[in-house]
Image (tube, grey):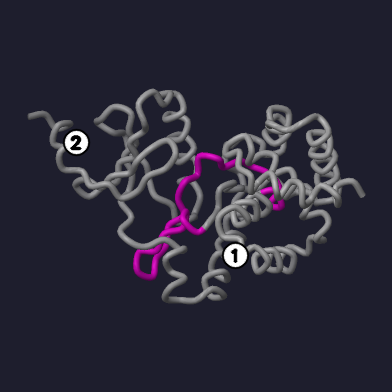
Amino acid sequence: MSLYDDFLKERIEIGAGMVAKVYSWRGYAYKCFHEGYPAEWIAYEQSQQNEICKSKLPVPRYYTSDFPNTIKMDLIAGISMSERFKVAGIDPVLDDFMLWFQRIHQTEGLALQSLSECLLKIIDTAPVDETQKAYARKCFDMVEEIVPEQEVLCHMDYHMLNIMYEGSNMRIIDWVNAKNGKPIWDYARTYVVFYEYAAGLKRRYLKRVLFLENYSEEIFMKAIYVNAIYRLTEHDTKRIRRLIQEISPSVLN
């Protein structure tokens, strides 16, 4: 029996996503991508993580895997921030959430793509009509004009399932969407995720963002609109389309 046969027989599933399942095996985690997932996308994800590991943030390391269509990484034996709600309560967990979000945005100098350039390209490919695309471009231009220029690390998928606790330590995972850009786009992306999956938290989260970063609610809503359009290119749901419709009247002003 080969090592790969042992892996297939002994591995234990610990997570699943849209493109891959994650297994534990012999002290490491293995992200096993679904059949047909492009090899170049796997290589891109590994290069992204290797770049993030140059920062001082608490992140897992990736390693060369002996098995096809997989990424080998540090095994995190703990619970997600989402699960931590049950023992710590909403406000303390949200405080931790925002603290680490700000620390991410203190990281500079990584060799990553431009977030602003990516957002503009994504607007053009979004499954919405030309009027909505025009609104999104208008919002993008206003945010870029008003918000001070910054080129810092943005996670662009920062939510409570991507923060793991190992006792008193924590790790931030899933950096494949990371870019360099303005934090407002990153904060807005997370609002869209809360709106879609944890609507009860969105108002608390919104208040914290506006207080910590001193954004006006009007400009932040414009950043949210752009990110909702972006989200449709990944996950086209009625809920995200409802968010777009809710914000549209304010965009017209």
Q: Is 164 within the magenta? A: yes
Q: Which residue is mark 1?
A: 98
> Of residues 55 and 237, which is closer to you in this image?
237
Identify which residue is drawn at 65% across, 69% down.
204
SS at mark 1 in the image = helix
Q: Nearer the viewer, mark 2 or mark 1?
A: 2
Q: Is residue 15 above or below residue 79?
A: above
Q: Which residue is mark 2?
A: 8
Mark 2–mark 1 distance (CA, rounded to whole Å): 39 Å
Q: Residue 12 in the image: x percent, y percent?
A: 23, 47
Identify which residue is drawn at 35% across, 48% down.
15
Give the residue type at disc 2. Leu
Q: Is residue 242 above or below residue 118?
A: below
SS at mark 2 in the image = helix
**Dot 2: few (<14), some (14–19), or many (≥20) neighbours within 10 Å?**
few
Give the residue type at disc 1. Met
Q: Residue 169 in the image: x percent, y percent?
A: 39, 65
Q: Is residue 18 above or below residue 201?
A: above
Decide: marks 2, 1 in contact (CB < 8 A)?
A: no
Q: Which residues are magenta?
A: 160-185
Residue 122 position by quadrant: top right
**Along the horizontal axis of the image, is 206 left or right of 250?**
left
Q: Is 234 within the magenta? A: no
Of the numbered discs 2 and 1, the one sitting upstream in the chain is 2
